[in-house]
Each structure stands twice: as C-alpha cells, then as structure tokens.
Image (cartoon, helix red, strand yellow):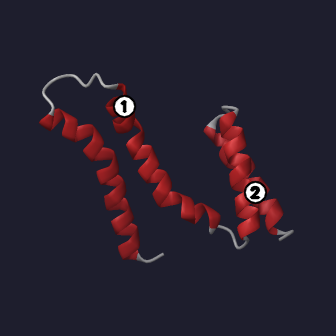
C-alpha cells in the first residue's frame, strides 16, 4: 500500500463521516422526519468505510480462502452480537490457523 492511496482513503473516510452528519445542519433548517433520509444519513458512513476496508480484509493474509473463511466466521459471530474484541481475536485465530492449511 503506497502513501498516496492511504491518504486518499483517509480523506474519503473523513468525508464519509463528516458530510452526512454536517450538511444536514447547514442546509436543512427543520428536523428530518423521513425514515428513509434518517436511515440513509445514519448508515452511509458505515457503508463507505466497509467498502473501503473490505478488499483489504480478503487480501490481508497470504491465503484468500483462509481470509474468506475468517471473514465469514467474523460475520457469524457479529450476527450473534459477540463483543468486538472476541470477534477480532477469534477471526484472527481462524485466519492464522487456516493459513497453515491453504
């Protein structure tokens, strides 16, 4: 990963979190009551951050199958609402362990 890509990614993440939360205060003078716009503005930063980081999750190890299985394991644990430290630790162990097999 080169420095320019890292800086561009950081700028995009900054904009993705700042713009949806800042612009409504500037341009909209009344309270947002539409459920669509409220959920759109709430989930937009998470979607952009996920889109920027997900490719590196799959290529973070030397083995694509090990990273994919660890990602699925992390998603399953997140679905069952385990805390973030447990999800990170267990998915790391899964990726590390499967790295020897693949």
Dot 1, crowdedness within 10 Å: few (<14), some or many (≥20)? few
Residue 45, position as x, y percentages in the image: 39, 45
Distance from disc 2 to disc 1, alpha carbons, whole Å, reads 34 Å
Query: Which of the two labelled residues, at mark 2 and mark 1, occupies the earlier sequence position?
Result: 1
Residue 73, position as x, y percentages in the image: 74, 48
Residue at image location 67% in from the left, 36% down from the top: 79
Dot 2, crowdedness within 10 Å: few (<14), some or many (≥20)? some
Q: Count the numbered circles shown.
A: 2
As drawn, 1 above or below 32: below
Secondary structure of the residue carrying numbered label 1: helix
Rendered-image quadrant of the C terminus:
bottom right
Which residue occupies the foreground of this view, 65 or 1? 65
Quadrant of residue 77 within the rendered picture: top right
Residue at image location 43% in from the left, 77% down from the top: 2
Looking at this rendering, what residue extends furthest in the right direction? 101
Q: Which residue corresponds to mark 1?
A: 36
Q: Which residue corresponds to mark 2?
A: 69
Secondary structure of the residue carrying numbered label 2: helix
């Amino acid at each position: 990963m080169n420095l320019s890509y890292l800086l561009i990614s950081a700028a995009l993440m900054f904009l993705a979190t700042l713009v949806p939360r800042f612009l409504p205060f500037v341009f909209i003078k009344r309270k947002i009551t539409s459920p669509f716009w409220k959920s759109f503005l709430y989930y937009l930063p998470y979607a952009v951050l996920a889109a920027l980081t997900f490719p590196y999750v799959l290529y973070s190890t030397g083995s694509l199958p090990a990273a994919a299985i660890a990602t699925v394991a992390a998603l399953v644990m997140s679905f069952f609402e385990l805390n973030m430290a447990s999800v990170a630790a267990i998915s790391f162990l899964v990726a590390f362990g499967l790295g020897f097999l693949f």
